[in-house]
Image (cartoon, grey):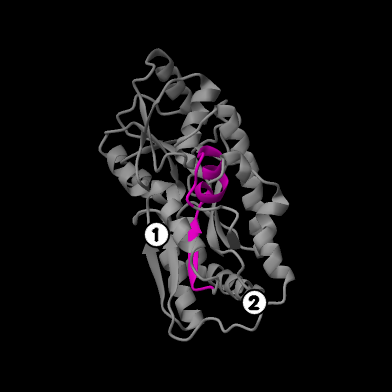
Amino acid sequence: MSSPRSFAVPFACLLAPLLFALASESPAQEFPLPGKPIRIVVPFPAGGQADTLSRAMGLRLGESLGVPVVTDFKPGASTAIGALDVQRSPADGHTLLFTNPLTHAQNPHLRAQLTYDPRLFTPIFQLVDAPNVLTAHPSVPANTVRELVAFAKVNPGKLTFASISPGSSSHLLGELLMQKTGIVLVHVPYKGAGDANRDLWGGQVNFLFDGMGSAIPGIKAKRVKPLAIAAKQRNPALPDVPTFDEEGIAGVDLAGYVGFFGPAGMPQAIVARLNAEMQKAMDTPAMTELILRGGNSPAGGPPAKFAKLVSEQSEAWGAVIRKLGLKLE
C-alpha cells in the first residue's frame, strides 16, 4: 500500500502508461474479439448521470463495433471496487472504467491506503465536462448562497449537506464552502447520487453539491432549488443560476469530468480505435443532445488530452485537499 502523497505524482508519471502504449509497437491484436462483450464498469450505483451516459455510449459502441456492450455497476469504497476490477482485467479493450475525478484525482490525496493504484490505468476518452450545482430542499430558508451563508452563521451546525460519497466532489465542495465562508455544516455521506437525492427531496438533508445530470430532474420538478453553479461561468441548462463568484465567494469553481479508462498497457491500436469510436458516438446529434440536456458539455479529443486533464485535476484537487487538511480512512 502507498501513501496519498506517493500518488501526487508529476504529469509525466500519470501519463506513463498511456505514453508507453503510444510510443511502443504492440503486437497485432484483434479488436474487438468476435462475440466477446465489452464491459463498462461504473463504480457508482445505478440511477445517476454515469448510468445514463454509460448506457447511451454502450449502445452506440455496440452498434459500431458489432459486439455486445454491457454496463456493470460496481459501487462502493469510493469507486475502489470498480477501479480495482478494471485494473486487474486484461488490457484488451474489453473492460473499461467510466468514472469521474474521485478515482484518479481525489482519492489518492485523501486516503492513506488504496486497494488500486491510480497510475495503472490508460486514459481513453473524456466524454463530458461536468460542473456541479448546489441544490437545496425547498424548506431551506435561503434562495441564494448569500442568504445561506447568513442563515448558517447564526445557526451553526443546524444545516446538513449530503454527498454522493466521502471524498467526492460533492463532499469536497461542501468542505471548501465552509472554509471559504466560516460557516459550519454537517456532512451526511451517501453511496451515490440517487440515494443522496432521495433524502434531499424528502427533506432529510438540506443541501447537495450535485452533478448537473442528476440535479436537473429535481430542479425541473421543483423538488429542489438551485443556489449556485460551482464553475467559472453560468451553465446554459440553468442560465438564471449564478456562479459562486457572482455570489461573492471565489474559488468554489472546480468542475469535473466523466470519462473512460482502461487497464495499464493497452495497445496503441486499441486505444486509438476506442477513442475514435467514442468520438463518433459523442458527435451524433442524439448523444450531444443527451449530454447538453443533462447540463454537461461534450468534451472529446485524443487520449493524451484527457490524460493531461486528469493530471491537472489531480494537482488542483490535491492542493484543495491539503489546504482543507482532510484525510479519510
Residue drawn 51% across and 44% down?
Answer: 107
**Is 89 contained in the magenta span?**
no
Residue at label 1? 51
Residue that sits furthest to the bottom in the current view = 34
**Three-letter amino acid code at disc 2?**
Ala
Q: Which residues are magenta?
A: 93-115
Q: Secondary structure at mark 1?
A: helix
Residue drawn 47% across and 57% down?
Answer: 84
**Is 106 contained in the magenta span?**
yes
| CA distance separating discs 2 and 1 | 27 Å
* 46 vs 148: above or below: below
Answer with left or right where residue 244 lies relative to residue 81: right
Q: Is residue 245 visible?
A: no
Residue drawn 48% across and 23% down?
Answer: 146
**Three-letter amino acid code at disc 1?**
Asp
Q: Secondary structure at mark 2?
A: helix
Residue at label 2? 269
Residues 85 and 217: in front is: 85
Rendering coords of residue 211 (x, y %):
45, 46
Rendering coords of residue 152 (x, y %):
41, 19
Between marks 2 and 1 in the image, the one whose residue lies nearer the viewer: 2
Q: Is residue 3 visible?
A: yes
Residues 190 and 58: in front is: 190
Image-quadrant location for residue 225: top left
Answer with mark 2 or mark 1, whichever residue precedes in sequence.
Answer: 1
Rendering coords of residue 253 (x, y %):
58, 37
Quadrant (top left/top right/bottom left/bottom right) for the C terminus: top left
* 120 vs 157: above or below: below
Residue drawn 51% across and 71% down?
Answer: 90
* 129 vs 253: above or below: below
